[in-house]
Amino acid sequence: MRNGTPTKWTMPKPMSHNNSQAQFTKNSQKPTQLPHATLADTPRISTEEWEFLLEMLKWPSPTIENPTPTEATDPRKCTFTVLNWKDNYTVGDFVNVSVVARNGRGVPKIYGGDFFQAKLYNTELKASTFGLVVDHDNGTYSVSFALLWPGPAHFSIRLIHSSEAVQVLSRHRERDPDKVFFTGYFEDGDIKENVVCNAMKSPRLVGDGSHCCCEHRDPRSGEVWFCRRPASLPCSALVYHSMGRYQAQLSTNESKILGRGNTNIVLPGSSPVINVFAQHTDIRKCSFPPTYCSPLSANTVTRKRKYTLS
């Protein structure tokens, strides 16, 4: 949006698929060849590598298919404990924290998948560092913090999304990939029509099939932009498009699970403050003049200069 006006993207006139490799420039009578990406130019991976990557990126799912908001992780009921508590720490030490996820009834969860974010910070020093969160897939999580500065340090454990919210997002990503739609503007003289457009031919875009579809292929990448066919204008009349709106189809329970009251919430409780001290070692600083030793080799003499340690 700019000054209340929706952002517009100009669109080139649709080109024939057979002609997608050529385009006339303003001052030339000969077509200019445009680079075109093909599958042969794209690095390929094996099926085994692809399946391995998918397995590594797989997020744990709740054991309940359609949980209620009460069964979802409640950030106000979750707790965390410092495992290796000491009165004093030293820069370079690690602090380990255990997090227990609980549902809306305060009952500990028995499966993982919650998206926690952990931070150690000092507001006065404007210093902070994120912790490494490990999901044990049983409702408990371990967090490891590296102590990187001397002075007080505070904990902040934040629930970004519950495992149930992640499940909802994942499900709708697969079922409703076009949650955002765009508006295509077709013009020919004084005749103007607006239709729905998107980057994929989804059921919501196709509708009953009576007005589907205009296809605009990018001459460089080969990607296709789909629009419902205007009632009275040809597909070539597309001049630009703008973002429309979101069209999520969530149930009442899903909306509550994804609600602001359960998203990006800091776990309550008195955040313990740990004291971190600078390292003290016996290593002494060199004072001027420093030592210099030339390398040893045949027919050379080693030269030494005096130095002192303070």
Image (cartoon, grey):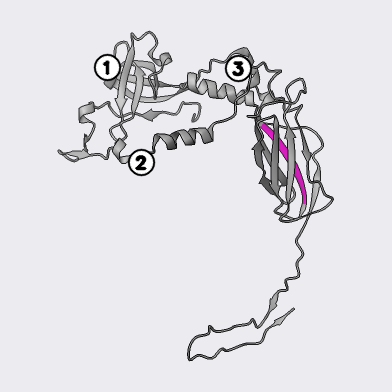
Question: Residue under circle 2?
Answer: 43
Amino acid carrying mark 1 in the image: Pro
Disc on res. 81: none
Upstream in sequence: badge 2 or badge 1: 2
Q: Residue 267 at x, y = what percent?
A: 74, 32
Label the magenta part by its dominant secondary structure: strand
Quote the CA–CA distance across marks 2 and 1.
38 Å
**Would residue 230 be found to the left or right of residue 132 on screen?**
left
Which of discs 2 and 1 lies nearer the camera? The answer is 2
CB contact under 8 Å: marks 2 and 3: no
Quote the CA–CA distance across marks 1 and 3.
46 Å
Above or below — where is 179 with respect to 308?
above
Question: Residue under circle 1?
Answer: 234
Quote the CA–CA distance across marks 2 and 3.
37 Å
Q: Residue 308 at x, y = what percent?
A: 71, 83
Q: Is residue 283 visible?
A: yes
Amino acid carrying mark 3 in the image: Glu
Magenta-tinted stretch: 152-159
CB contact under 8 Å: marks 2 and 1: no
Upstream in sequence: badge 1 or badge 3: 3
Q: Is residue 155 magenta?
A: yes
Crowding around mark 3 (Cα neighbors within 10 Å: few <14, some 14 to 19, many 20+) is few
Q: Residue 200 at x, y = what percent?
A: 39, 22
Q: Is residue 37 visible?
A: no
Question: Residue under circle 3?
Answer: 65
Above or below — where is 19 with respect to 254?
below
- Nearest the camera: 102 or 13? 102
**Would residue 241 be found to the left or right of residue 253 on screen?**
left
CB contact under 8 Å: marks 1 and 3: no
Crowding around mark 1 (Cα neighbors within 10 Å: few <14, some 14 to 19, many 20+) is few
Upstream in sequence: badge 2 or badge 3: 2
